[in-house]
Amino acid sequence: MFTGIVEEVGTIKEIKKGSKSAILTIKGDVVTKDSKLGDSIAVNGVCLTVTSLSGNIFTADVMAETMRRTSLGDLSAGSKVNLERAMAANGRFGGHIVSGHIDGIGTIQNFLREDNAVWVTIGAESKILKYIIEKGSIAIDGISLTVAYVDESCFKVSIIPHTASETTLLTKKVGDVVNLENDVVGKYVEKLLGYKDEKESKHSSGISEDFLIKNGFM
């Protein structure tokens, strides 16, 4: 579990690509300090498992499914990435609940400066946008952000100077792809409501007030 509060910007030292998978080698001075084999580290919002560790360098395997659903396949040696260790039980919960399981990708459409902040517009598919609400939370490349605007084709967030300096978001260009993770609460609510409707439909007896009237019981 993560919070979306990025701890540092790391660097991809090497990426070995298989036919569908990859092995990432990443430099991170902060996230490697107390990490060990098997620990989880979010890389651009993607929860990855540490498979080897040496000083401030760690490696992580990326399976084919993760390559298909995220932007990790676009990385190369020298790419900058947002890094966050899994949340400690005694830590402050500064962002929102982030699982590191990416729902899909979005495309940066526009940057617009407004005084000390920068508005970022991101286009996404309807399957992502349906879970996004104004003033709700979204994780973009692992960064916990508040949605300031949303419509049928895109959403917008406003980036303050601190977030700009501590993450990679404003180093992106129009047309770049970012990883998106929706707030988990909305997905669970949808699942539960759909499950209830499905169960009620399956177990419905078909008896209604109209049925009783038509058959002379009322």
Image: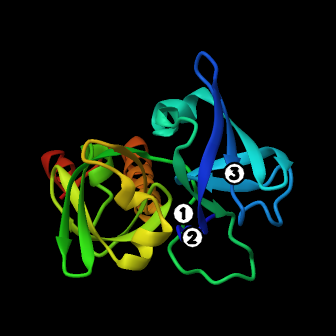
Q: Which residue is mark 3?
A: 27
Circle 1/circle 2 CB separation < 8 Å? yes
Q: Is residue 170 left or right of residue 94?
A: left
Between 178 and 56, the one lying in front of the other is 56
x and y percent of residue 143 in the render? 47, 64
* Residue at disc 3, secondary structure: strand
Between 10 and 70, the one lying in front of the other is 10
Residue at point 24%, 47% (across, down): 174
Q: Which residue is mark 2?
A: 3
Q: Earlier in the sequence, mark 1 or mark 2?
A: 2
Residue 195 shows in this picture: yes
* Residue at disc 2, secondary structure: loop
From mark 3 to mark 1, how far is it between C-alphas? 22 Å
| View extreme (top): residue | 19
Residue 121 vertical position relative to residue 91 in the rendered view, above or below: above
x and y percent of residue 186 in the render? 40, 62
x and y percent of residue 192 in the render? 45, 57
Residue at point 29%, 76% (across, down): 135
Q: Earlier in the sequence, mark 3 or mark 1?
A: 3
Q: Which residue is mark 1?
A: 98
Image-quadrant location for residue 201: top left
Q: Is residue 137 left or right of residue 27?
A: left
Q: Amino acid at mark 2?
A: Thr
